[in-house]
Image (cartoon, rainbow, N blue to C red):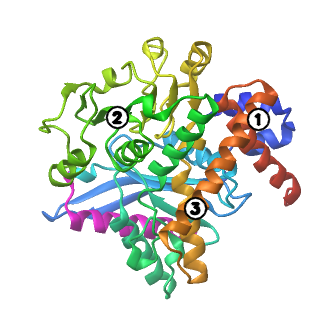
Amino acid sequence: MQVRFDQAADRLGLDPNLFGILRSCEREITISIPVVMDDGSVSVFEGYRVQHSTARGPAKGGIRFAKNVNRDEVRALAAWMTWKCAVVNVPFGGGKGGVVCDPFKMSRAELERLTRRYVAGIMDLLGPDRDVPAPDMGTDGQIMSWIMDTYSMHSKGYTPAIVTGKPIGLGGSLGRIEATGRGVMLCTREALKHLDMDATKCTAAIQGAGNVGLISALQLATLGVKIVAISDVHGGLYNAKGLDLEGIREFLMRNRKLEGFDGGDRISNAEILELPVDILVPAATENVITSRNVGNIQARIITEGANGPCTANADKILDEKGVFVIPDILANAGGVTVSYFEWVQDRIGLFWPQKEVEERMEHIMVDAFAAVVDMARKWEVSNRIAAYMLGVNRVAEITRMRGIYA
């Protein structure tokens, strides 16, 4: 993140004083979270919440429960959220949270106690006008419900706008579950138009079969793209004739993993990245395309459904290969866009039909894609650096307008 920020700031000729402000996180908190486990023992977990910037609005960003989450990762993700919100021009800053745990080995009751104690520990940072969390890796709508309830109990009121990604009955937005995957599709559709490629003659491989990966696959299929490979954490499936996506969706709902689905050849997560496809969607985790494997990438378009799937060292090689990269801070911004809509709907108490949500999101995503491509053309930089330049410049302008409080 910092390497790319530095490149964007250098091209913009960013004021050195603003450079120091925007490169740093505004606020960080690390807490210990004691939780009584089901067997009566007490485990102590470490949790984080980082606010990178609130210049453009409340900090916005997910909370992940994962074994390998750490403070530097949370800092980078918080900064990415700042640039992502600025790229799609929604009035949020960037934040991120995490708890070091393995949610898949914890009971529902243990997860609830962990979530509520974590929220109590970061309560002073949260608020509809201060910091609005959302789901991320290892968290879901139920955990967001516990966050909303815990905050509401402490604040002695009903505060649905404290968090997004909630169930519909608690103030969630229609279209939120599909939003990130739909945004991936919209950006890919615009890239196909830009490159004069026929979607119905294209193939795609998707790394990731979770909320982002599977929905991206289903959405791309509506364009006529043939999905030939998809994977989860245990490995993937490849079928050159095209995968049965509806069958995969039903199988995953029952089994929660791809293993055992009879519809293609087994393939590793590393191999899926190197398939001879037109479109590659890394939608699982960060740092999967590196200087070690980037030379084997055959896709013409990479649409980054995950945060940070390409390392900075891989960027230059992808540029040299002529790969059209749709960077994460644009490609997966459909989620935060509809999170913004959810926050707005909660605050005004008026909820929109799904068609309206999708139309509003499409308008924002298409405009953002055009702005990034135009920036890349004018400045003769990659799409990634163009997206950073667009986001950094918007945050810098607002920071300059607000001035430095002393």
Left or right of 279? Residue 26 is right
Q: Which residue is mark 2?
A: 227
Residue 273 image point, x, y percent: 38, 24
Q: Which residue is mark 3?
A: 359
Quadrant for the N terminus in the image:
top right
Neighbour class for label 2 at 10 Å: few (<14), some, many (≥20)?
many
Residue 30 image point, x, y percent: 49, 53
Q: Main secondary structure of the magenta part?
A: helix
Tell me which label, 2 or 1, sits earlier in the chain.
Answer: 2
Neighbour class for label 3 at 10 Å: few (<14), some, many (≥20)?
few
Residue 41 image point, x, y percent: 18, 61
Q: Which mark is residue 177?
A: none
Q: Which mark is residue 375?
A: 1
Q: CA distance from mark 2 to mark 3?
A: 25 Å
393 over 322 or under it: above or below: below
Which residue is nearer to you in this view: 42 or 322?
322
Viewer can see residue 375: yes
Left or right of 83? Residue 389 is right
Please tell me whether mark 1 sits on a helix, a strand or a loop.
helix
